[in-house]
Amino acid sequence: MIALSHRIFDYAEEAFAEIESAADIVAVLRAKGINARTGVYGLPTAFEAETGSGSGPTLVILAEYDALPGIGHGCGHNIIAAAAVGAFLALATVGEELPGRILLLGTPAEEGGNGKEILARAGAFADVDAAIMVHPFGYDAADHPFIGRRIVRVRYTGVASHASSSPFMGRNALDAVALNYQAVAFLRQHMPPGDRIHGIIVAGGDRPNIVPADAELEYYLRSPAIETLKDLSQRFDEIAAGCALATGTGFEVIWDPSPYSLPIRFNGPLTARWAVRQAEIGRTVLTRAVVPSELAASTDFGNVSARIPGIHPVIQVSPPGVALHTAEFADFASGEGGDRAVNDGAGGLALTAADFLFDSDLRQAVEDDFQAAGGVLDVENYFA
């Protein structure tokens, strides 16, 4: 599994283009006698494998293997993939003795493409009772907050005119963009502490002597709760409309060019079991009560956790001060810390999965916790 992790690290394939990474994983599985299916649920670089008995509960272990532009596996997805495959192969050695099924699902395009939501809409989790995965990080934590994210573009359309001889004949779309950017900045003071908005101007005109008739911004909106993400989205819609009214321009708001990411809903009993299994090998797993919440990012696993019970713990591969999505973190993801996380992550996932299948009291606690958190959410239509 360590060798597999290093090969995936070297492939460094971006979202939806993880051809060699997926093929390598499938080859490893087939060499162990596992019938892995490729191109599942409509995504060419997705794959699925199965072990266990045909009856009883079903748990899926998720593998990510896409990389980032420029810095490769600066998020350590090579570790996620290798740990997931290792856990699955460990469980496959006793497959027929398992009182249920274990699935291994290769999930492309976590970085920007929200591949898990695409898979979910195609039915990947329809007959699954729980989902687990592990993500590399700067420390060990059971329920580090991963917040929701939406992408939005707002386009303003005005009227072009000569900026010197007849500016009064124009309607300036760039003015609307500038006003929008400032209005969003003013909103930040009044947002809950965990909310985030960050944006760029992607178009602002062609020449200074032409009143811009078209201008555009793109933002990421993030929030730690799905309800507050919806509130933040509504506030943004109001700002977009107000700026158009103030500048006499037309506008269009384009939400979610790729599927949005929801905040992770951590399952308490399953998370606790992961922490116990990690403690057995000497890892002290922290909780969100002691982990800095401002280090939050977003992931498409949140969409899975709103459909079925799930966990997404993080495992230490680097010192705490090293940030994800950096070349420095990539060095650790391919180093000794990353190799140790592959082994420890695989063991923790395998044992947690086995506990879920064998322990009916745990499964009931997992389901009770999921229902108490709101049960199954209509993810696809939540923001409609």
Image (cartoon, rainbow, N blue to C red):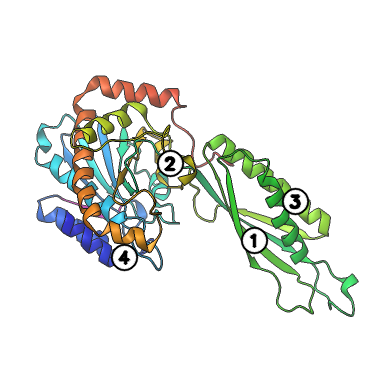
Q: Earlier in the sequence, mark 4 or mark 1?
A: 4
Quarter of the image with the C terminus is top right
Please tell me whether mark 2 sits on a helix, a strand or a loop.
helix
The residue under label 3 is 241
Label 2 and label 4: CA atoms lie apart by: 24 Å
Residue type at numbered disc 1: Leu
Label 4 and label 1: CA atoms lie apart by: 30 Å
Q: Which residues are magenta?
A: 35-40
User: Is the residue marked by circle 1 packed among few (<14), some (14-19), or many (20+) residues within 10 Å?
Assistant: many
Front residue of 369/184: it is: 184
* Disc nearest the viewer among 3 and 1: 1
Q: Earlier in the sequence, mark 2 or mark 4?
A: 4
Residue type at numbered disc 4: Ala
Q: Are marks 2 and 4 in contact (CB under 8 Å)?
A: no
Residue shown at 23% from the left, 33% from the top: 279
The residue under label 4 is 12
User: Is the residue marked by circle 4 packed among few (<14), some (14-19), or many (20+) residues within 10 Å?
Assistant: many
Residue 357 lies in what quarter of the image? top left
Front residue of 67/17: it is: 67
Please tell me whether mark 3 sits on a helix, a strand or a loop.
helix
Please tell me whether mark 4 sits on a helix, a strand or a loop.
loop
Per the rendering, the mark at residue 302 is 2
Relative side of 169 to 22, left or right: right
Per the rendering, the mark at residue 158 is none
Q: Are marks 3 and 4 in contact (CB under 8 Å)?
A: no
Residue 358 location, x and y as percent? 18, 26
The residue under label 1 is 217
Residue shown at 16% from the left, 41% from the top: 51
Q: Are marks 2 and 3 in contact (CB under 8 Å)?
A: no
Q: In the rendered image of this protein, does residue 295 appear above or below residue 24?
A: above
Residue type at numbered disc 3: Ala
